[in-house]
Amino acid sequence: MNFYEHTLIAKQDISTPDLEKIEKKYEDIITKTAGKVIKVEKWGLMNFAKKIRAYNKGFYIHYKFEGESKTLEEIKKNSIIDNSLLRHLTVKYKKLDTETEYFKEKYNNEKKK
Amino acid sequence: MKRKSNKKFNKRPQNPLNKLSLFQKSDSRFSKTCPLSGKDAPAVDYKNIKLLKRYISDTDKIMPARITSVSQNKQRKLTSEIKKAKILGLI
């Protein structure tokens, strides 16, 4: 078992119930394939540095989990097919840092506005 | 015989801006130690955008280590983390 981080970028024009569905969908995939979700971070709606497929903004969801190669395959399969996602990235870690949240402040500032 | 004192060289002002080429290092402007290694060094991570932006030019190119004085090991890590951040559209 190894530690991983996975981030998804969903399209901007998705409604909030659909966003929650996406979030649950990938949580279920991890737990079904003998993995364990440690933390889920919602970074919220953020601006891209450059346009990605004619979109300027996107919803970011960040997972920290423990899993095997099976879980990675399943996640990759599903996220490539998924039409509501723009990009995804998984990174392997020896130790997970669950304390520092780099995008927490940004998300709160956008909410106030 | 008396030796000639090399006053000529002592008198020359040591201006840091007085360089031969653009890429020549001068001691006063650049720190020689790596800013990313050591005890209280910040974490090099693709989520830490504030730090990564310091090592990128205006046109989103990765700065060479000879200018930023980052160590070889950390420079390798920096490039990989910057590329990850670019995939996610953070930089």
Image (spheres, coloured by chain):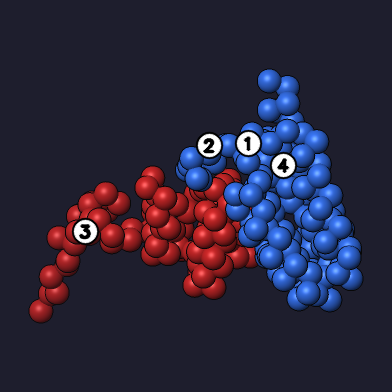
Percent x, y of residue A112: 73, 22
> Label 1: which residue?
A12
Q: Is residue A112 above or below residue B12?
A: above
Marks 3 and 1, Cα distance to the nearest angstrom? 48 Å
Q: What is the residue that sits farthest to the bottom in this orientation?
A: B1
Q: Residues within 10 Å of mark 3 (few under 14, many from 20)?
A: few
Residue in the foreground of this view, choosing between B41 and A71: A71
Which residue does the image show at 60% across and 53% down from the upper left? A87
Percent x, y of residue B73: 54, 73
> Label 2: which residue?
A56
Does residue A84 appear left or right of residue B67 in this picture? right
Image marks 2 and 3: residues in contact by CB distance under 8 Å: no
- In the rendered structure, the residue with mark 4 lies on which chain? A
Indicate the secondary structure of the residue bearing disc 2. strand
Marks 1 and 4, Cα distance to the nearest angstrom? 13 Å
Image marks 2 and 1: residues in contact by CB distance under 8 Å: yes
Q: Colour of chain B?
A: red
Count of residue discs: 4
Q: Residues within 10 Å of mark 2 (few under 14, many from 20)?
A: some
Marks 2 and 1, Cα distance to the nearest angstrom? 8 Å
Query: Which kind of residue does numbered mark 1 sit on?
Result: Gln
